[in-house]
Amino acid sequence: MAAFRWCPRLPARRLGMAVLFLCCASLPAGPEAARAQSPAGSSGAADAFAGALALYQDRLYGSAQEAFADFRSTFPAHSRAPEALFYEARALLAMDKGAAAARRLERLQAGYPAHPLAERAQLRLGRYFFEQGADEDARRTLRRVLSGRGPPERAPEARFLLGRLAQRQGRPAEALEQFRAVSETYPDAEAAPRALYQVASVHLQQGRTAEAADALERLARRYPEDPKAGSLGLALAEVYFDLERYGEVLGELDQRRAALETQSDRARAAFLRAEALRRQGGRRSEAANAYQRYLERFAGSADTRAARYGLALLRYRREEHSRAAALFARVAEEAPDSAGVGNGDASADMRERAAYLGAVSRAEAGEAGAAAEAFAAFVRRFPQSPRRADAQYRRGRALLAAGRPAEAARVLGRLRPGEAPEGFEAAAEARYVRSRALREDGQNAEAIAALKDALAAGLPAEMAAQARFERGQLLLGAGRPAEAADAFAAYRRQAPEGERAAEARYYEAEGRYRAGAFQTAARGYQRYLDEHPNGDYAGAAQYGLGWASFQQADYAAAARAFERFLSRPDARARSTYLSDALLRLGDSYYARRRFAEAERAYARAEGDARDYALYQTGQVRSRTDDLGGAVAAWRELVEKFPESELREEARFQIGQARFQQERYDDAVRAWRALLEGGAGGALAAKAQYSIGDALYNAGRPNAAARAYRAVLENYSESAFASDAARGVALVTEGDASFGADSLNALSPDAAAEVRFRRAEAQYQRGQTDAARQAFLRFVRTSSREDLLPQAYYYLGTIYAESGKYREAEGYLRQVLREYPDSDRRADAAGRLGALYLQTRGDPERALDAYEQMQAFAASDADRVQARAHYGQGRALAALGRSADAEARFREATERAPESPIAQNARVARARLYEDTGRSEEAQALYRRVAEESRGAAGAEALYRLGALLLEQDRPEAAVEELRRLPELFAGFPDWIARGLLAQARAFRAMDRPAQARRLYDRLQNKFAGTEEARTARKEQEAL
């Protein structure tokens, strides 16, 4: 028997199958033996059996197996059928088909339980179950062997296997009992030396060194000729190795080196030395040298593949990735070990691991293309490997690194939710890497979706933060700025100290800006500047702050921001930003009527921005009555920038300057020259309309009327048609030759427009009765479908203002009922809602009207939608449905967060909180509105905050808030009056009557005739 090598942590030996084969070989193998076991039978059966047996003896196992199977099929009742079944199982075992062999052996036991071969089959089946890890089947089968009537020589092997089974299952006492029974009861059995060896092994596992030594000494004394006794040092080294006591492995090998006589033992000792050095740690160089010596001296030995694999691992851990990859590749491609040398399953597992690590090494070496191909080959070669999913993932990464993003995305796409193997830990990371591949391939929408999937799958924290940042970038580039801003905010929340937190702060503000949330954007830009005044994005943030302030019409803040940007050292390097910042700085000063500073800013603009700067310079000079200078600037633009989009507008402005100089004829000539030069579109309509204005101011009404009519005739679809109709209505009032009736034959639509505009002008001048009559005549005689709903809307408004609510309701409902395509439907529904809520006290119908308003408004008309939600909230509050009302107020705020209606909604929500006892929330909202709004909502919020504090018996705090009303909201006297009255009451509560009297006097003097003044007088008299 070959020397036993027990080292389960190394590639396992196929000793079990080999022993099974050797035990099977002890059966009768020749014709004489076969004849001894069976009657002669017919000559055909004998010949068939002999032929099958001959094939078996010639090691033609496949043909032998088929021949024995044919024999059993042809002669099922023959006395040698059990023997044929047994030999068929032996042939299958020789072909390494253990499962099929086990089925034959089970059939032998079941079909021929009394046959002598059945007992032998039972032992072989027990060994098969043991080797396959079917522990319970093995235990049951082996115990049947011990309890059967078979010869006693089978008991030692059965007990030995039961001992090994108990040892494997962690039952050392039972294992020792079985092994001792073999060595003591059956000392002459073939299994006895192996049993003693396992006794030593169990003791060593238990740390009982003395008992282990005693067992090994008995082994040497009792079986001096046994190969195990002759290589005792190697055996001990093997045991120490299995126990991971690598220092003792090395010590044993050094001590017993001289006693190792065979080449195979010396080879094994050399391999164990290299493995122990590698696993001991800190001795990688010695281990590498030991592996190298082994491969040079013992090439072709049993452990050659494992040695090469160990050396490859060392190279890999020393980051010698290219050398490691070459070694791993060789291990993976070497032929499987032959039977009797190594365990086939372990050998296959090593080849699989080597193929995988070889691909990993290629990737670590930066050989992305080669790594991708190696991982692809691994997946094809080992389709059932548990590493297959990871290999696919790494293949995708390698393809991406190799500049092949489309292929990477396809490969990684196979690991999406529901497609990745269960337990694959990198599934979320795979989706993240796939998003990068899609992004590099230009598939940004798909990349955004992949990042969402990756985050939902549970990325590690650091990777999740990075994914949110990248998703923000993609969303920003895809024109989805609000979502992008949310993604950047999520990144900051998850990684507040992350390396890209500052960048995320900037891009969050940028996203808010692009989404139109300018106030929020401005706060974000300022926060970035406060936290990172010298950050990489400080210049861009300063520039963005300027634009966000500009968009809010906060021109003072915009000018400060643009000035700070322009004063930065890096501003000159940002040439695009520089020019635009100069223009916006000029515009900010222009809006604040600081014309000198504006012109200086425009003068600094250069390059492509110069034409706009000249145009605005003309505007500045025009506003400062330097019309000559304005004309000079515009002429410079016309002459120097013939391709500028502003050139025709500058020519128009030259005519406008002449108009302002009351040089009407020059203005008319300039505008006519503009028209004759080919100007078209809105500018042409404006020029034609302006000619009418110039002629009218020049005292030439008939010529003006003709000019206005030319607008109606030639530019009837322009924005100036309505103004031209008003002009005709004004100029020809009382002159039928130029009035609407005279236009009727030429253009009935233009005539209708003139009649409508006359009525509209009367309403706007406060001539409501005349306007009402004119609108009534218009709706009776006109067929202009675009103007009729507006006329009905005006009629509804006029009747509502005059207190005739029934008539108002009828006309407004007519707009809703008869003109489904009119833009006035939403306005009409909103006015109906206000009518029902404020004058009829009917919140149910008001709610219906505001819901109609929401339905009629365009989906992207955010402010109209916000007004509808606000109206619904007020109606619901009047119905006592506070929770629903609060939800509508929130929707109004979210729909148009920067609009005045949003502030009104916040005030309304705060009043709800106040009414339901949520005082702290009410105060917080009032404070917010008072800080953010400088309109009526802000004034109301500040007053209500003071009143709430006074109601809470906090008069000092109330006065502190209320005294700010006149300064911050000077344009809202009603709220100032209420605030003064509340302050007086606060001083009375503090027992400071003198100050209360001063405030009462101030109220009566400044706001005489108001309800607050009358109340102040009564309260003052009561002091």
Image (spheres, rainbow, N blue to C red):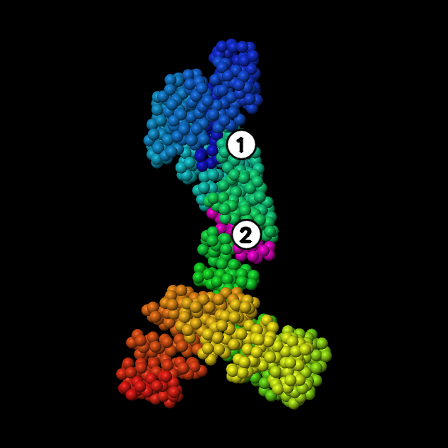
Which SS class for mark 1?
loop
What type of secondary structure mainly makes up the magenta span? helix
Please tell me which residue is depicted at 58% across the width and 42% down the height of the picture: 377
How many discs mark residues in the rendered view? 2
Magenta part of the chain:
425-449
Please tell me which residue is depicted at 48% across the width and 54% down the height of the picture: 455
Which SS class for mark 2?
helix
Q: Position of residue 115 (x, y in %)?
A: 43, 16
Callout 2, which amino acid?
Arg
The numbered mark at residue 337 is 1
Vertical placement of residue 114 versus 453, above or below: above
Is residue 592 in sight in this rendering?
Answer: no
Is residue 274 in sight in this rendering?
Answer: yes
436 part of magenta stretch = yes
**Which residue carries the number 2 mark?**
434
Q: Position of residue 509 (x, y in %)?
A: 50, 67
